[in-house]
Structure formats: C-alpha cells, structure tokens
Amino acid sequence: MWQRDILGDDWLNRTINVPELRGKKMVSTLVSRPQWLVSREHADRPHTAVLYIHGYNDYFFQTHVAQFFEDLGLAFFALDLHGYGRSTTDETTRNDAHSLREYGNELAAATHIIREEYGYESLLIMGHSTGGLLAALWAHSETGRATVDGLILNSPWFDLNRSWFDRTVGTAMLDAVGNYVTDYVITNDDSPYTRMLHTSYGGLWDFNMDWKRERPAPVRTGWLRAIREGQARIAYGLNLTCPILACVSERSVSPYAEPDLTRTSDTVLDVHQITARARQLGDNVEIASIPQGVHDLALSQPKPRDMYFNAIADWLSRHNLVSTQKYTAWKDQTDSVLPTT
C-alpha cells in the first residue's frame, strides 16, 4: 500500500481512493516516512501526529517542516488533496471543487489511518492558506471534533483579499450563479509569488512547477463559490474548543511590489483579514505575527522561518503537546524568540 515517493530518501506515499466527483475518478495521497508507520507498541514511537494540508496551487514538498516536528518528537503526515500535486488525475479536475465538503472523505480516511490504523493518541492538523480554511472547517465537523486535538494555521485563507465590492456584491452574484455555471473561468492569472519562491528565479526553494505552477491557473466559479461559503462559516464563528495557533506575516504587499518587499511580506492574502477572522474560530486562539514572513511562512528567509518555528514550538509546549525534554533540546539549538498575542 505504501510506495516510494518522489521526495526520495525514505519518503513513502499511499493512495486513498475518493468517490467519483462529477463523473471523474479521484484520488488523494498520504505522505509519510517509515519511522512514523509503526504500531503504538513500538517503544520510541511518538504519541502525537501532525497532518499537514497544503494550499491552493500547491502540494507537500516542505520536508524541513516534517523534520522540525520530528525533532520535537512528533510524527508527521501530509495529504495531497484530490486534484492537487500527486493526486492530479487530469487538467479538468485540477484544483477544483464545488463544495469544500467534497474533501471530507479523504480527510476522514487520512484521520482514520493515523488514529486507528497506527494508533496515534493525539492528532494536530496543520493547514496552509486554503488548507488552513479546510483544517478549521474539518475541526468543526462531527468527525473533526472527535479526532482533532489542535490546529496550527499558516496564513489561513479566511477572507477574499479583494475590494469591498468584490467581497460583498461580487460574492452575492457568485452565490446566485456559481451553483449553475460552475466552470466559468473568473481569472486565469500567473503566479509572481511562485516565481519568487523557486530557485530558477533566484528563490530559495526547488519544487515541481507542474504541481505548484507559476504559469496561469484558472479560478472557476464553482470553486470560488465553495471557498466563499467556507469563509462565511468562519465569519459566523465556529466555537472550536481545541487550542489553535494562527500564524501570519507582519504585513501584506502587492505581488508586483519591489523584490525587497515581496520576499519579506505576504503577497497573496491580507494579514489583517486573517487576524480578525482567526479570532472567530473559538476561545482558545493565539496569533503569532512573523516579521518579514512570506505567505507560506515555512518558505520565508531563514530568520523569519526560525521565528515561525519558534512560535509553533512554544505553543506546543504551553499546551503540553510536546515533551519538556524534546522542547528544551530543540530550543537549545535556536536563538529566536517570538512573543504571541
């Protein structure tokens, strides 16, 4: 069931079959490593696992994030959702959904594998951007409330980073037609943000640009309507009881700003919107603002990246989600300190 993954080394992946959607075959893909795929009786196996959910136009390749959690004594799994990355079956279903509930089957399957097959006692969901929106909504579901013990959100997409008119009148129009005209392409823009990240354009990161594209990617009415419905649920409030850490960059700028700004800011979302909406998730929310962080904080320059990891490690320690011994050993290796609010 587990097979060698494109990441190489000892990374493995496992295909999860997903019910057909609109007549199309779908799969999702769970990614992990052998040391985390052992039974609970194994003496050195962690008690807590992290499940990572990527963002839009994205897939899991951030192995340094997995290493960070392993250093803290946690197991790590990542899920490429249907239509993304390893789970892309064709171009017509790429990055597409007509309801965010369509992802429920694969999230339930991944949760079952981690908690039931491998017997992890605690489960943390880590979501980036669109994955952060999904993570919060999944934690609010009946299955999520029973299985999720905490949320770590990396620049979650909680509101539309557009004008008042687009967020209100535009959303009302989208709601009226988006359920019927699902495949109309609203935008088909390229991604300056992806270019900024990739080594071929002078960035720090190497990844598969067929799966995380800098060339135009269509945004369709059905998908954006599903996103706006999910964001409306966040705005209404979820009353989650699990501890939540929401991490954001300190500032947002245009993706066409000067390079010194785009490499040290969120060029995708409005960080003030994220902060305001994050407080609607529940009564146990902490927000960490990362100076000079980019949209995916884990892909920032070294200093803000270290601050981001420090914020997570400190939060895990405060909520007894990591052992004191592992936390202390990890802190001894880093000098960054980040206050949370």
Image (cartoon, rainbow, N blue to C red):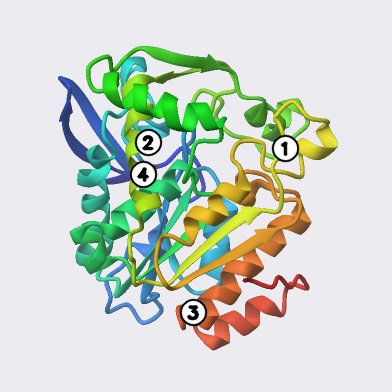
The reply to whether residue 12 is in sight is no
Q: For the residue marked with disc 1, what is the amino acid?
A: Val
**Crowdedness of circle 1 by 10 Å Cα count: few (<14), some, many (20+)?**
some
Q: Tell me the crowding category of disc 3: few under 14, some 14 to 19, or many 20 or more residues within 10 angstroms, Cα based.
A: many
Q: Which residue is mark 3?
A: 322
Which disc is residue 227 wearing? 2
Q: Which mark is residue 253?
A: 1
Of 292 and 60, the residue lying toward us? 292
Give the residue displayed 56% in from the left and 56% down from the top: 275
Is 5 in front, or is 328? 328
Disc 2 marks a residue whose amino acid type is Ile
The residue that label 4 is drawn on is: 232
Are the residues at dot 1 and dot 2 in contact (C-beta closer than 8 Å)? no
Looking at marks 3 and 1 on the same chain, the residue that comes earlier in the sequence is marked by 1
Label tally: 4
Helix, strand or loop status at disc 4: helix
The residues bearing labels 4 and 1 have C-alpha atoms spaced at a distance of: 24 Å
Separation of residues labelled 3 and 1 (CA atoms): 35 Å
The spot of residue 198 in percent (x, y) is 68, 32
What residue do we see at 25% from left, 65% from top?
A: 145
Q: Nearer the viewer, residue 149 or 203?
A: 149
Q: CA distance from mark 4 to mark 3?
A: 33 Å
**Badge 4: how crowded within 10 Å, few (<14), some, or many (20+)?**
few
Give the mark nearest the N terminus, 1 or 2: 2
